[in-house]
Image (spheres, coloured by chain):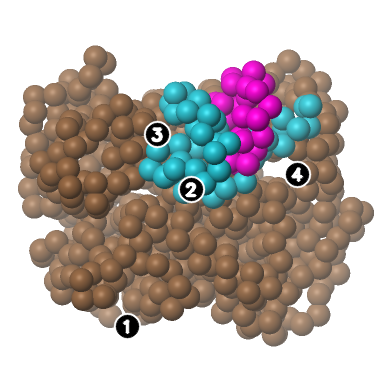
Chain colours: A cyan, B brown
Amino acid sequence: MTAELNRLRWRCQRGMLELDHILRGFLDTGYLAAPPETQRAFESLLSMEDADILDLVMGRTTPVSGELVPLLALLQRRI
Amino acid sequence: MIPKRTFDAVIIGGGGAGLRAALQMAQADLKVAVISKVFPTRSHTVSAQGGITAALGNVSDDDWHWHMYDTVKGSDYLGDQDAIEFMCRNAPTAVYELEHMGLPFSRLDNGKIYQRPFGGQSQNFGGEQAVRTCAAADRTGHALLHTLYQRNIAARTQFFEEFFALDLIRDEEGYVLGVSALEIETGQPWLFEARVTLLATGGGARIFRHSTNAHINSGDGLGMILRAGLPLEDMEFWQFHPTGIPEIGSLITEGVRGEGGYLLNKDNERFMLRYAPNAHDLASRDVVSRAIAQEILAGRGCGPHGDFVYLKIDHIGADKIKSRLPGIRELSMQFAGVDPCEAPIPVTPTAHYMMGGIPTNLHAQVVTPERYGPEEAVPGLYAVGECACVSVHGANRLGGNSLLDLVVFGRAAGNHAIEYLRENTIPRPLPADASDLATGRLARWDKAKGNERVPKLRAEMQRILQEHCGVYRREDLLKEGIEKLGQVEARLQDAVIEDRSKMFNTARLEALELENLLPIARATLVSALARTESRGAHSREDYPKRDDDQWLRHTLYSRENDQLDYKPVRLKPLTVETFQPKERTY
């Protein structure tokens, strides 16, 4: 689990400071307590481009995949 | 010896500078590797929202010579005028090249590339506001990265993603022969052998507590340079962006003021009218940052602690804000809790950009004082982008010139490297100790014993730099800062990481990053203490005037004994007359 969390922690390192705050914040304090489908959604979010993640978290765009919706609600509450 | 890969050129950093240089070389059928600690399209270039400056004249009359004047003046005359002419002359070509590669620039009604006004831009050598910054909505950096990445894939550049560069490989004659790097996924160190090594590792503004920079900006290339015994140039010059969101660091682009926004103090006074009677809120960034800092120091800051001012934009109307500055509106709502359509945004000066860096010439070759003069090229070594100091930004960078710097000098580096590779066809043998520095650093963290922890030491370094080397500097503060930083450096010897695993060991990476940040912090403090004048972003309370007689020169800092050398500013442009230093007013 440590290696897995470390992998996610490194992938939370982004080109945008705002995403560093949002993604690392969730990984450190919300990820382990989240249900497995939300954890999977987080991993899928991390594979996306920075500008697209920011658009989703800011609510400028709606996700194509429904599985991101509960995760985005969690991230938006955390900001 | 650790395992080895061989290329013609290895580029460290997958941001705009690295990708532009890589593309130039890959299109010449060279075998090019790009090593990047994150996926290239997640590099910090993605944060450059505002745009790229070029005198296209699509909105207002314009001329590259006016752009050059603004950049020289903006640099507070510390920028090298040959490099500035080279950049400004080549700007339109560089932008059209990006357009032809497919970068989706925003358009005017007549179909030409959209341009917006930015601070410090003028027509006719200091006249009316020029409109010079080309933009792809507020996603210019993102669009640039994607365009260059796709082109590199087509040109068969090889990407080594999630590899952390450790140290340069240099032989006894001073040739740079590649780099060692850590594969983050496995913990395996590698040697990347190449006749050309190019550093494009970005800036290091994470040395400060309040910074707009992403966490990956740990100045890795600068750390490598200092460990290789090479100097850094003008490290006292850090740009504080005037409008960062307090605490978070999130940047509110100058484009907001370009679209008509202005700053207010707690008395609702539009104070920039006093500090910059002509340019007002669109004065150069250092001028605006100092003005805000002055207002805060004078007790005219806003909020319960009086530690920020307001940026008002609601008067231009919600429709314009939503159409022209949508990203900024969202940022403000999410991170400052304010809808700029209805209320002003709280902002404060925040460390943003490193004007200094690795000394380079017009071809992006790394240069160092050696036997034959102050600017002798280090064979096989190049640097481009924020990590480099060519120096086009001098003591203060103008908005929109950073993306331009990346593409103009990325292309120039590629062109020169192609020639260098043609003349140096046979790889020189790697020295027997090629991997020793890197493996030694890794082993130190694997075996370390002690009670100190990396995150705590990093936080202390950031607090020291913020408090002792921020917008305003003073001799006693700087001396105290150097002393405190020395204590942090000493404690680093007792620092340990608890996680000794191999795969994605982020604790080890943070330790290696701190080994890069700390010497940058020292270079900054030492260089700032020595420069007893105020110029551009370097403001000394005890030396408030610019002193051209003594200080119209570049600082060169070397790690051994904190040695400082100086070299003259190149005042002679390539083809036009010198812009003689004058008092800088806006």
Provide residue B557's location: percent of width, then percent of height: 53, 48
Q: Residue B129 occupies which quadrant of the picture?
A: bottom left
Label 2: element kind: helix
Q: Amino acid at mark 2?
A: Asp
Label 4: element kind: loop
- Asked if the magenta segment contains residue B328, the reply would be no
Q: Nearer the viewer, mark 4 or mark 2?
A: 2
Q: Amino acid at mark 1?
A: Thr
Q: Which residue is mark 2?
A: A52
Measured along the vertical axis of the image, is residue B441 above or below residue B496? below
Q: Amino acid at mark 3?
A: Gly
Q: Pointer 4: residues within 10 angstroms few (<14), some, or many (20+)?
A: many
* Gap in angstroms between the C-alphas marked 3 and 2: 20 Å
Provide residue A29's location: percent of width, then percent of height: 59, 20
Measured along the vertical axis of the image, is residue A11 above or below residue B9? above
Number of numbered labels in the structure image: 4
Q: Which residue is mark 3?
A: B249
* Gap in angstroms between the C-alphas marked 1 and 2: 44 Å
Q: Which residue is mark 1?
A: B575
Q: Quadrant of the N terminus of chain B?
A: bottom right
Front-lying residue, B113 or B368: B113
Residue range (magenta)? A24-46
